[in-house]
């Protein structure tokens, strides 16, 4: 098979503490892959600075000047992890035959990239990095993650459990993915929809070497909600079902009220009335909120604003 080029895309946001060591590690892994003399003899690294406010970009410039295999792309501000991944893939696909995405903290095992390249050589267009355990997570994070995967499955969303954004994709798989024009993107939910041949590589996630997680609880919850509302309308259908059940219950209550009135068993109660009003009012507010989320996303899609703004590219 002809020589194939490998590009590793690394989104980075305020990663000054780990970036240099992480890039050196990735360079050595690319050298090992080249030494295997199967594929990926040509390789480089593309770092996407997602509007960092520390010295991340200065480090990227220094790495670029010291090694031509290291390229950089800088956003004008923070646009988010998913936008950084898309920008990196869009730039990398211009010259790469296979693209690996991995976070700068290297909690995902970079040694598995060689195994991903092997599976690509065997014909896989997409190779998922899948965690084989979640021992490094807290009980809360582990439990909520498993519950989230089960919820999405019940809602009809095809997702690879315990897979984040550590994956290898072929050139044609990336080009097909980039044809999806929506702005509210949940990448790990869209990739399985591409339909290409896939494989999986198991790995154990390690704690961060330094720095802080860029996904605290608030961001994780927002990301999870985006995943649901970007891939399924099941919440709106659930509202329809609840509304239908409420109407049926109301009909039953009318019948009950008529019977009790005729039997002279009517009881005047302020508490029951207030509880009913608050309950119905709460359901209505939640329903409007869910519908509003979808309307808001539709508004964003209709405006067709750019996903991100690139300030600088280091070729």
Image (cartoon, grey):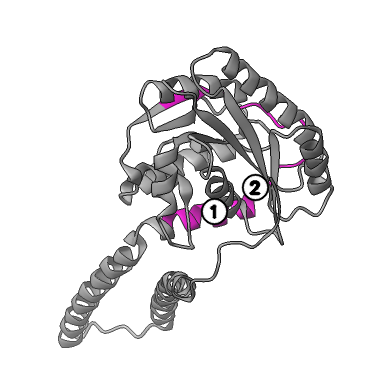
Q: Which residue is mark 2?
A: 215
Q: Are marks 1 and 2 in contact (CB under 8 Å)?
A: yes
Q: Residue at x 15, y 81 (%)?
A: 259
Q: Position of residue 92 (x, y in %)?
A: 56, 43
Up the image or down, 313 lies above or below 243; here it is above
Res 267 quadrant in image: bottom left
Up the image or down, 164 lies above or below 83; here it is above
Seen from this angle, which residue lies furthest top?
36
Q: Is residue 203 magenta?
A: yes
Element assignment for label 1: helix
Q: Residue at x 47, y 73 (%)?
A: 296
Q: How much space separates mark 1 and mark 2, taking CA atoms?
A: 9 Å
Of 212 and 290, nearer the camera is 212
Res 191 quadrant in image: top left
Q: Position of residue 45 (x, y in %)?
A: 65, 35
Q: Which residue is mark 1?
A: 223
Q: Which residues are magenta?
A: 200-228
Element assignment for label 2: loop
Q: What is the crowding at mark 1: few (fewer than 14 residues within 10 Å), some, or many (at least 20)?
A: some
Of 110 and 151, nearer the camera is 110
Q: In the drawing, does residue 164 fall left or right of residue 48?
A: left
Q: In the drawing, does residue 60 fall left or right of residue 292?
A: right
């Amino acid at each position: 098979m002809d020589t194939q080029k490998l590009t590793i895309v690394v989104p980075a946001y305020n990663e000054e503490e780990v970036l240099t060591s992480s890039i050196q590690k990735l360079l050595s892994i690319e050298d090992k892959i080249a030494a295997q003399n199967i594929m990926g003899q040509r390789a480089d690294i593309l770092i996407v600075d997602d509007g960092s406010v520390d010295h991340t970009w200065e480090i990227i410039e220094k790495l670029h000047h010291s090694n031509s295999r290291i390229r950089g792309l800088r956003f004008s501000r923070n646009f988010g992890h998913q936008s950084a991944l898309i920008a990196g893939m869009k730039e990398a696909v211009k010259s790469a035959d296979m693209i690996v995405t991995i976070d700068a903290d290297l909690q995902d095992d970079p040694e598995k990239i060689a195994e991903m390249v092997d599976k690509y050589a065997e014909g896989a267009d997409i190779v998922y990095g899948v965690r084989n355990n979640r021992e490094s997570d807290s009980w809360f994070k582990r439990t909520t993650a498993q519950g989230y995967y089960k919820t999405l499955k019940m809602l009809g969303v095809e997702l690879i459990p315990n897979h984040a954004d550590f994956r290898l994709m072929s050139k044609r798989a990336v080009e097909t993915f980039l044809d999806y024009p929506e702005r509210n993107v949940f990448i790990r939910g869209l990739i399985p929809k591409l339909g290409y041949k896939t494989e999986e590589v198991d790995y154990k996630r390690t704690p961060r070497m330094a720095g802080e997680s860029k996904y605290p609880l608030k961001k994780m919850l927002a990301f999870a909600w985006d995943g649901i509302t970007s891939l399924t309308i099941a919440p709106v259908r659930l509202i329809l079902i609840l509304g239908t059940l409420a109407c049926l219950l109301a009909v039953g209550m009318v019948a009950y009220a008529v019977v009790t009135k005729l039997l002279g068993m009517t009881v005047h109660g302020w508490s029951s009335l207030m509880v009913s009003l608050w309950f119905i009012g709460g359901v209505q507010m939640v329903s409007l909120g869910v519908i509003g989320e979808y309307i808001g996303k539709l508004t964003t899609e209709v405006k067709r604003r750019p996903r991100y703004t690139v300030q600088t590219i280091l070729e």
